[in-house]
Image (cartoon, rainbow, N blue to C red):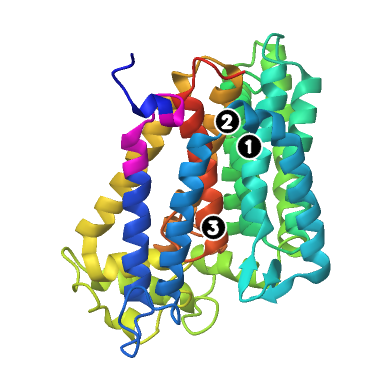
Amino acid sequence: MSNHPKHRLFGGDVDWFTVLLWFALCIIGWFNIHAAVFDPEYPSLFNLNTNYGKQSIYIFSAIILAVTILIVDAKFYSSVSPILYAITILLLITVLIVGRNVGGNQAWIPIGSFRLQPSEFAKLATCLLLARYLSAQSTKSPTLKSLFFGAIIILLPVFLVLLQPDTGSALAFFALIFVFYREGYISGAWMLFGALCILLFVLALAFNPWIVVLILAAICGLGIYYFRKKTKIIINLIVLFVLSALYIFSVEFVYENVLQSHQRNRIDVILGKIDDPRGEGYNLNQSMIAIGSGQFWGKGYLQGTQTKYNFVPEQSTDFIFCTIGEEWGFVGCMVVIGIYLTLLLRIINIAERQRTAFARIYAYGVACILFFHFAINIGMTIGIVPIIGIPLPFISYGGSSLWSFTILLFIMIKFDANRKGIV
């Protein structure tokens, strides 16, 4: 007889430490939503007339979802992944037809008083189908064909989300590029190339493109002089310079014709090209004031003045981290960041101990999505990345967000619990 009765209920050894980290983030989120939109007329955390009361229902529902996921056979999630993916694609199309426009994005399907955001669940479905497809190729050497079809799995929902248009949610899918890197489809050299492209993009926006090109020309010129006796290297440097120059000058076209005006303005504020504390820079300005005013220990629970007087926009959703910074200070911020980093490292550890390619690839997908949301959400509240409007996992207010992230995480936990029997 087994010495672990939990095996009989969940079919494996559940990583309870990861479950504890998830629950801690949910509770931290609940209390900070309470502080962010506190209404003295409805002080109870369970009052359904308030966002914090509704969040209590979402958390309770998430617990039921988590338990259900742990009970269901792990093989089910692999077999149903194409169906889930197809459903989310249909929902992404449906939201373009009947969706409710909120803040310029037609990203929600109204269901009574609840609003369903399909793009959140699309990340889950994409991770599952990508894991299924790439794991089916795991016995073969990585090929360009496999990379192409894997990319299509990601790009289809990205295209539909961009039509909403919800650039923030669309960008989250691109974090899955690290899955391709882990599985050997993309080399470290290509990852470095991608990083350099991002760097050139930022430099081209921050400075005059001609200045950037001239600096590159000087660097390549020094390289040509140093390697003047090596013809092949010289040719490569010339080709690299020409391609880089073309890329830099194309940045302006993308900036002017692809990004929306408010997104361009937000980037300009971040780069310091415009000073607009009452316009596009208002959100960022108030966010940084709120976090800075918390200083080391914070002002205390329900004592945040920036929060209490509604200076910070979207306080319970995209800018929930401001409430943490103002009321719990630097210490509170470090605790929350520490919990996230511990969770991410735990997920990577779980991924590496899996015995099947499917479970490993899926776990890395989970890590990519959570890391992107965590890094970008906190980054935009402290002014190091543009404001693109994405939730902080498990902490921001919202049923779609909490449920989708919970399902995403607990399917991985189920795979880990059953890692000897997953196919």
* Residue 362 - label: 2
* Residue at image mark 1: 127
The front one of 188 and 15 is: 15
Q: Quadrant of residue 104?
A: bottom right
- Residue at image point 55% right, 34% down: 72
Q: Is residue 112 above or below residue 168?
A: below
Q: CA distance from mark 2 to mark 3?
A: 19 Å
Callout 2 touching callout 3 (CB < 8 Å): no
Q: In x, y percent, where is residue 420?
A: 49, 15
Calculate the distance from the C-alpha at mark 3 to the C-alpha at mark 1.
16 Å
Give, as a three-letter code, the residue at label 3.
Answer: Ser
Q: Is residue 16 magenta?
A: yes
Residue where numbered disc 3 is placed: 401
User: Residue 139, can we see it?
Assistant: yes
Circle 3 — which element? helix
Q: Position of residue 389 (x, y in %)?
A: 55, 64
The N terminus lies in quadrant? top left
Residue 174 x %, y %: 64, 42
Q: Secondary structure at mark 2?
A: helix
- Above or below 87: residue 368: above
Q: Nearer the viewer, residue 101 or 378?
A: 101
Task: Using residue 183 as the reference point, say whether residue 21 is left or right of it.
Answer: left
